[in-house]
Image: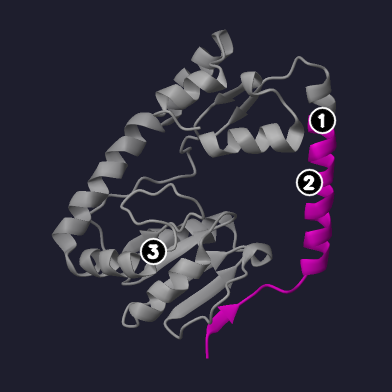
Amino acid sequence: MPRCRWRNSGLGLYCWSLRCHNLLRRFVYHCAIATGRMWATVSSLPLCDQYVESFGISAARISILHDAWGPSHTVLPADRADEGYAFSGGDTARDWDTVLPVAHACSDVPFRIVARRANWHPTGDVPPNVNVRADTSPGEFFSIASRARLVILPLNSNVSDLLVPMGGAEEMASVLRCYWTDHNLRIKIAMVPESHVLEHFSPDAYARQVAAWSVVPAPLWMCKALAGGHK
């Protein structure tokens, strides 16, 4: 039987409170935007169009401010002991319909998935080598992720890193097997994003972004141009 463990207690209250939070946020945002004096920051380019559509804010008043890792995040060495499983998790925009077929194809690899119950709607069955948990605490989430041999980030978009196109379960399974069995290659590849994160997403890098933005906010068209012409 698929191993899924959900936290049912207080789920109705949680959903009601989340709905109220979203309605209140939308109301406050619309009031602030209506003044014509509000600037917005988003952490990635795809969120720009979403803010324009959802809140009616002018694209000229949106700037990119990338998230940073903070004191609660630990940058672990790439060459460390693991507990021999593949981890996948996250909140929204997760392509679970690709991850589960990958787990089917790699039946000898244990998978641990942590998801939001509200956003967990896979169309296929959960294979027996997959353990699914929902709505864990942030500490528990990162603890499970940090002990994994591989982390799969199944973004429900065309943005990827190693990577395979959205919905490319066969390609993802092939990549997973390659890195699962080749320790040296896995460590070599892991060092690249680690160096990138330390350089560009540190608290110091975040502070420099804030300082630059607070002087002259970069318009959306400039952010897109710097990012390679995304539309």
- Say which residue label 1 marks: 30
Earlier-in-chain disc, 1 versus 2? 2
Q: CA distance from mark 2 to mark 3?
A: 33 Å
Tag 2–tag 3 contact (CB < 8 Å): no
Q: Amino acid at mark 3?
A: Gly
Q: Hey, which residue is sitting farthest bottom in the picture?
A: 1
Image mark for residue 22: 2
Residue displayed at 57% across by 64% down = 115
In this rendering, the answer to whether 229 lies above or below 76 is above
Q: Which mark is residue 168?
A: 3
| Residue 203 appears in the picture as rendered | yes
- Label 2 near label 1: C-beta < 8 Å? no
Q: Residue at x 60, y 78 (%)?
A: 5
Disc sitting over residue 199 in the figure: none
Range covered by the magenta-colored residues: 1-29
Measured from the top left, where is residue 145 in percent x and y?
43, 60
SS class of the residue under badge 3? loop
- Is residue 23 in the magenta section? yes
SS majority, magenta: helix
Q: What color scheme is it?
A: one colour
Closer to the camera in the image, 110 or 165 = 165
Q: Is residue 139 left or right of residue 6?
A: left
> For the residue labelled by badge 2, is the local secondary structure a helix, a strand or a loop?
helix
